[in-house]
Image (cartoon, rainbow, N blue to C red):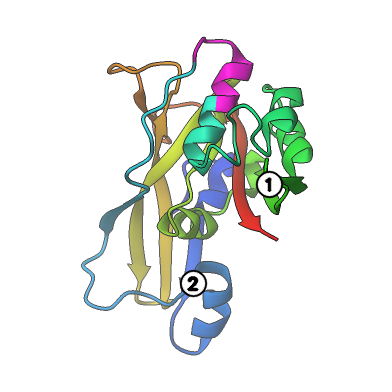
Amino acid sequence: MTQPSSCGSAFLVLAKFAASSCLAAAFLAGGCFGQGLTYPSIQEVRVSSLPSLMARSHDPSDVLLTSLDTILHDKSVCCAKDSALEDSAQKADPSSLKDIAAKMQGRHLLSDGRPIVITAEYFEPAAINSGNLIATLGEKHALLFQWNSQLYVCYGVTYRKDYDPDTGTELDTIQKFLLLDTRYSDSRRATVFNRETDDWGKVQGMLRVTAAQQ
């Protein structure tokens, strides 16, 4: 069975049980072991066609606004002038994903008075789950990723899929986080957090933000 590289990253490996355990596994990971796969299998999921936005400065508040705008890509929601989240996002502490989530969570009004509901889910590093992360990206939702006190847009992951025939267990192990740094428009914009070479202790967590009309 594949083991995580350290105790602090154990959450990045998700077991999925076959046969009689399939229904229980589906609750956690969305399905049973794949058919016709050759193990181990390196796979990737990513959100494509995100807007190529660049923060107007390297100030953390500008980076937050631009990153949220990239994720939600609806200027009536965030973060243009008179958008639903303009005030809340500007009041949030860009160094704290918890505070960003608290400021944004709940009911907001569009400029025309229509209500929307923002769901902002903060995941501390130990709570990040590979199955949930892969499913979120598969649903075309990018996330905020905070690494070394810097905000990034996580638009994809590369993961390894293993299967142990003795136990009927399939494992998804996150290997790389594919990130966008909205401070830049050149080659520095696209970067990667590699679990094998980068320090997970410098990751502050992730934030999933979605908007829905009420």
* Figure quadrant of the C terminus: bottom right
Q: Is residue 214 left or right of residue 159?
A: right
As rendered, which of 110 and 35 lies closer to the eye? 110
Amino acid found under the numbered disc labelled 2: Gly
Figure disc tally: 2
Q: Is residue 194 magenta?
A: no
Q: Which residue is mark 1?
A: 120
Residue 143: assigned label: none
- Residue positioned 42% across, 53% down in the render: 173
- Give, as a three-letter code, the residue at label 1: Ala
Residue at 37%, 48% (x, y): give it. Answer: 47
Question: From the viewer's perspective, is residue 18 above or below residue 73?
Answer: below
Q: Position of residue 34 (x, y in %)?
A: 32, 74
Residues in magenta? 56-65
Tell me what residue is drawn at x 44 percent, y 27 percent.
198
Q: Quadrant of residue 196?
A: top left
30 relative to 22, above or below: above
SS label for mark 2: loop
In this rendered view, identify the residue nearer to me: 111 or 131.
111
Residue in the foreground of this view, choosing between 17 and 133: 133
Residue visible at 60% across and 20% down in the picture: 149
- The numbered disc on residue 30 is 2
- Residue 177 picture quarter: top left
User: Which one is closest to the eye, mark 1 or mark 2?
Assistant: 1
Q: Would residue 39 be found to the left or right of residue 4 on screen?
A: left
Residue 161 drawn above or below residue 24: above
Tell me the distance, in whole angstroms, between the alpha carbons under discs 1 and 2: 21 Å
Q: How would you rate the neighbour count of disc 2 (Cα within 10 Å): few for under 14, some for 14-19, many for 20 or more?
A: some
Magenta residues, dominant SS class: helix
How far across and down, in percent of the image, does residue 136 sit? 50, 56
* Residue occupying the far front of the picture: 112
